[in-house]
Image (spheres, grey):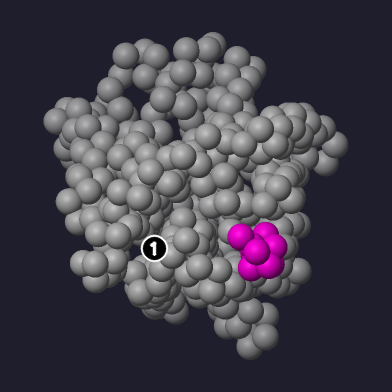
Amino acid sequence: MSTSRGSSPSSRSRSSRPVVAETRSQSRPEPRVLVAAFAAVLVFSGTWALLHVGFYKHDLILDTPVYQNYGNAIARGDVPYRDFDVEYPPGALPVFALPGFAEPGHDQDVTPGFKHAFETLMWLCGAGALLCMAVALVGVRATEPHAWAALAFAALAPLALGSVVLSRFDLWPALLVVGALAALVSGWLRFGSGLLGLAVSVKLFPAVLVPLAVSYVWRRVGRREALVCAGLVAAVVAVVFLPFVILSPGGVWHSLTVQLTRPLQIESLGSAFLLAAHHVFGVGLTMVTSHGSQNLSGGAATALGAVATVVQIAALVVVWGLFALGPPSRAALVRSSAAALAAFVAFGKVLSPQFLIWLIPVVPLVRGRRGLWASAVLACALVLTQLWFPFHYWSLANDFAPEQSWLVLARDLALVVLAAVLVLPSSDERDQATA
């Protein structure tokens, strides 16, 4: 700003067909969970309205002008990646193109038509994510109190994070991620794999869930079905990317390399350590604006960026490995998916506020006390983020303001704690896998 596990042949053959039948039999949301889901959508509608009033509408930092430029260009008939540069993968284009048919804007001036259309699409994505959460909660055999609490958390969480929810398109990939998880834990393995592939084509971060999904299918059903599902993920990504690769291979490659070679962004964990060193030891820092963000430059920043990438990959390997060694249960898949997303966000060299949107519909799905603790830590991270973004962001970026610097460090450490809370398997997951 983005595994494998073995089991004995006998255990695989025992779990193959009965597991699919069992999960499909539970895939229809129970009436009480449906009531909770629709209540959550109503609460989310109120949340959405509140984001437009009071302090939420002040000092906005928007990405919608960029989206509007993309949408207007598409409406004129220009081809993305060939006729104009696009920062994001092709799966993101629909949420720019549809509002782009509204009255064209100029520079940073977002027209009311585009703003209304874009925010409507994001509200639909948020409401859809809540409904997918309900399906997933049934799939993991959530208790009724857990279902109500998880849905209420997700419906209210945008108030904790703030106005960034309105002006970023991250609810679109978040919907696809939780939809894929809901399908997988409900026994719709191929459909879930297809949704996961679509999510990867929108933003690259859902790729960290692919090893978990393939391992889950392998352990629950068998190698052949796992290969089919992996092929579906790859096929969907290829179908979305291929037309643009044919029209402009260089443009698509440029878009990907820009995302994968970003410098150390100022809100990342590595930058937070440098900001702390700046205030405690007087370490000199330099901020540069590039790649659509404010970043730290210099030898220390470059080194910490490389370290962050290594730590991020190592953390993901740990999550994948622990899942591969643990029980192939639905609850374990959900918890490990939340852990992988948290690790990806916490340890990356880029950490924009909207990345926390990815966690909102997934973390509350985790069962038991661990889920409660994880949701509480996530809530803290959301609030800590809003304490400086957007209201005091430029004080952080331009002046390395002490208060905002320490808030960034506290938020980033909260995300590390979140990943740690989620990473280890629990006994109830093993019990569920053998049920």
- Left or right? Give the position of 19 relative to 142: left
Read off the residue under disc 1. Answer: 328
First to last magenta residue range? 367-375
**Viewer-nearest residue: 216 or 64:** 216
Tell me the chief SS of the magenta region. helix
Query: Does the image show residue 193?
Result: yes
Q: Amino acid at mark 1?
A: Pro
Q: Is residue 178 magenta?
A: no
Q: Residues within 10 Å of mark 1 (few under 14, many from 20)?
A: many
Which element carries disc 1, helix, strand or loop? loop
Query: Does the image show residue 305?
Result: no
Residue at left offset 68%, top offset 71%: 410
Q: Say which quarter of the image contains residue 32.
A: top right
Q: Say which quarter of the image contains residue 278.
A: bottom right
Residue at left offset 38%, top offset 20%: 73
Q: Position of residue 29 (x, y in %)?
A: 58, 36
**Viewer-nearest residue: 203 or 261:** 203
Direction bottom: furthest residue: 281
Q: Position of residue 147 (x, y in %)?
A: 67, 47
Q: Position of residue 416 (x, y in %)?
A: 57, 72
- Left or right? Give the position of 354 relative to 263: right
Q: Say which quarter of the image contains residue 42.
A: top right
